[in-house]
Image (cartoon, rainbow, N blue to C red):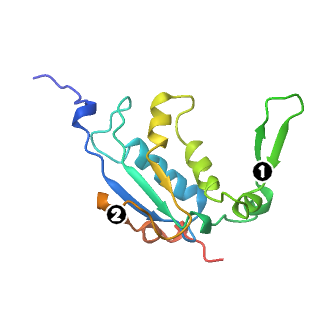
Amino acid sequence: MQKITASLKPAEVEKKWIVVDAQDAVVGRLASFIAMRLRGKHRPDYTPHVDCGDFVVVINADKVKFTGKKLDDKVYYRHTGHPGGIKETTPRKVLGGKFPERVLEKAVERMLPKESPLARKQLTHLLIYNNGEHPHQAQNPEVVDFAGRNAKNIRSL
């Protein structure tokens, strides 16, 4: 009797659609949950080299929360590519700016494997909206109660 590990093939993958409400959710906890669903690590038939994750729709992304003093003390760095071109910003500036969904988008992106074509493809399955509505009702998405999973997942302050 041989013991073999069953490996998924791309044609066998059935992707689900889930909706997560990010209102008052802690950014790091939400981002790790989303990254796990995008990669497919919640599935018993997870295969590392196959895109077996779900489509994730996030609503109310501009209402996420940080714990402690991270809203002001955490610093995001980027570089323009020119000498002396390092730029920095804080989550408070990003959330108060034109694209507040980038806080959550970057948090999820940084939890996926680096410089990987598969990770770039999986990140395209993340759809983030700042209001409570989304245009993906035709896919019959399943609503996931992220706040109810653990009391630490939300902050009301």
Residue 97 location in percent, x, y? Answer: 73, 61
Task: Determine whether 139 is above or below 116 in the image.
Answer: below
x 18%, y 26%: residue: 3
Which callout, 1 or 2, points to the residue nearer the camera? 2
Instruction: Assign the C terminus to one quadrant of the image.
Output: bottom right
Q: Residue at left 47%, top 49%?
A: 126
Q: Secondary structure at mark 2?
A: helix
Please tell me which residue is depicted at 57% across the width and 63% down the height of the picture. Answer: 61
Drawn side of residue 150 relative to residue 107, left or right: left
Residue 95 image point, x, y percent:
69, 62
Q: Is residue 66 left or right of residue 127?
A: right
Image spot of residue 28 (x, y percent): 59, 55
Q: Quadrant of residue 77?
A: top right
Going by the image, does 152 lie left or right of 91?
A: left
Most extreme residue toward the top is: 2
Q: In the rendered picture of this protein, how many numbered marks are placed on residues?
A: 2
Which comes before the other along the chain, label 1 or label 2? Answer: 1
Mark 1: amino acid: Val
Q: Nearer the viewer, residue 127 or 37?
A: 127
Question: Could one spot residue 55 in this view of the protein?
Answer: yes
Q: How would you rate the neighbour count of disc 2 (Cα within 10 Å): few for under 14, some for 14-19, many for 20 or more?
A: few
With respect to residue 48, does 53 lie above or below? below
Residue 147: mark? none
Q: From where the camera sits, is residue 8 visible? A: no
Residue holding disc 1: 75
The quarter of the rendered structure image containing the N terminus is top left
- Name the residue nearer the viewer: 6 or 123: 123
Which secondary structure lies at badge 1?
loop
Q: Which residue is mark 2?
A: 137
Whether the residues at callouts 1 and 2 have beta carbons within 8 Å, the answer is no
